[in-house]
Image (cartoon, rainbow, N blue to C red):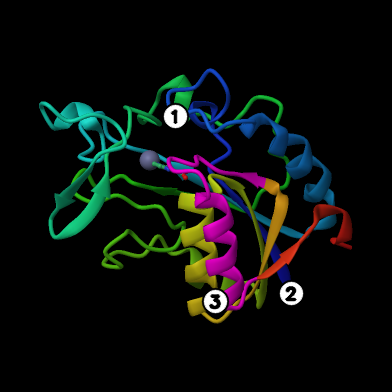
Amino acid sequence: MRALILVDLQNDFLPGGALAVPNGDAVIPVANALLPRFEIVVATQDWHPADHMSFAAQHPGRSPGEVVDLDGLPQVLWPVHCVQGTRGAEFAAPLCQEGWGAVFVKGTDPRVDSYSGFYDNGHRASTGLADWLRGRGVDTVYVMGLATDYCVKFTALDAVSEGFATHLVVDGCRGVELAPGDVEAALAELREAGVTLVDSGDVA
Ligand code: VGL
Ligand code: ZN
């Protein structure tokens, strides 16, 4: 059984949002086209408290893009984004939400960021996604969404280490590209980890 994992298709990651991913809106039609081809669909949702420590605003004198140490983990600082209950945290309006099996929120602990839909960045707490999928007989996942070089990458890497045959729908992803080449590097890392890169047009 296969499942589609939609990563963080939220207003704040779209043009005009607080952490806008360049051309992020281009992946919404890809998601809508893939949805009817999957019996099992899940979504992840970045869902931060207003004082999340990944926000540069919590670190006086620091700016978005800088890296700090957060409880022993390197943490890129971000603009305030995807705050629980705000419009920016909502799923993109043109995204079809019919037939979704579950939504897994992440980034709720103010002390640790959570790029992956499976675990926080310290691999300390699980969201329950892996068990949820296994409980439905899923052994194969297709991952797409925002952003390629952060949440999509770490979700796909965790999917592999959890034992799922993992596919990345490349045209269904866009990256932040804090540094030029970040997206290409992420794709190379994923390929090396055993992720199969596919085009949405090739997903039966
Ligand atoms: C993301 C940075 C911070 C993402 C989420 O969805 O890729 N990136 N929070
Ligand atoms: Zn976030």
* Mark pair 3, 2: CA separation: 22 Å
Look at the image and say whether residue 178 sits in the magenta stretch.
Answer: yes
Of residues 149 and 181, the one drawn nearer to the viewer in this rendering: 181
Eye-nearest disc, 1 or 2: 1
Among the 4 quarters of the image, the one containing residue 46: top left
- Give the Cα separation between the discs numbered 1 and 3: 27 Å
**Number of numbered labels in the structure image:** 3
State the quadrant of the N terminus: bottom right
Residue 134, x across and y down, in percent: 57, 76
- Residue that extends furthest to the front in the rendered view of this protein: 180
* Quadrant position of residue 53: top left
Residue placed under numbered mark 1 in the picture: 19
Residue 204, compared with residue 7, is above or below; it is: below
Amino acid at pointer 1: Leu
Q: Give the residues drawn in magenta, as a range.
A: 173-195
Mark 3 or mark 2: which is in front? Answer: 3
Asked if the residue under mark 3 is in contact with the one under mark 1, i.e. CB atoms within 8 Å, the reply is no
Query: Given the current orientation, which residue lies at the most extreme bottom position?
Result: 163
Q: Is residue 20 above or below residue 114?
A: above
Question: Percent position (x, y) of residue 5?
Answer: 62, 56
Report if residue 199 lies within the magenta region.
no
For disc 2, the marked residue is: 1
Few, some or many residues within 10 Å of mark 3 (<14, 14–19, 20+): some
**Residue placed at 12% from the left, 26% from the top?**
61
Mark 2 residue type: Met
* Quarter of the render that holds ligand 1: top left
* 14 relative to 124 in the view: left or right: right
Q: Which mark is residue 2?
A: none
- Residue located 57% across and 76% down the image: 192
Query: Which residue, given by chain and number where applicable, does mark 3 sit on?
Result: 193
- Label 1 beta carbon less than 8 Å to ligand 1: yes
User: In this view of the protein, which residue sits in the foreground, 13 or 96?
Assistant: 13
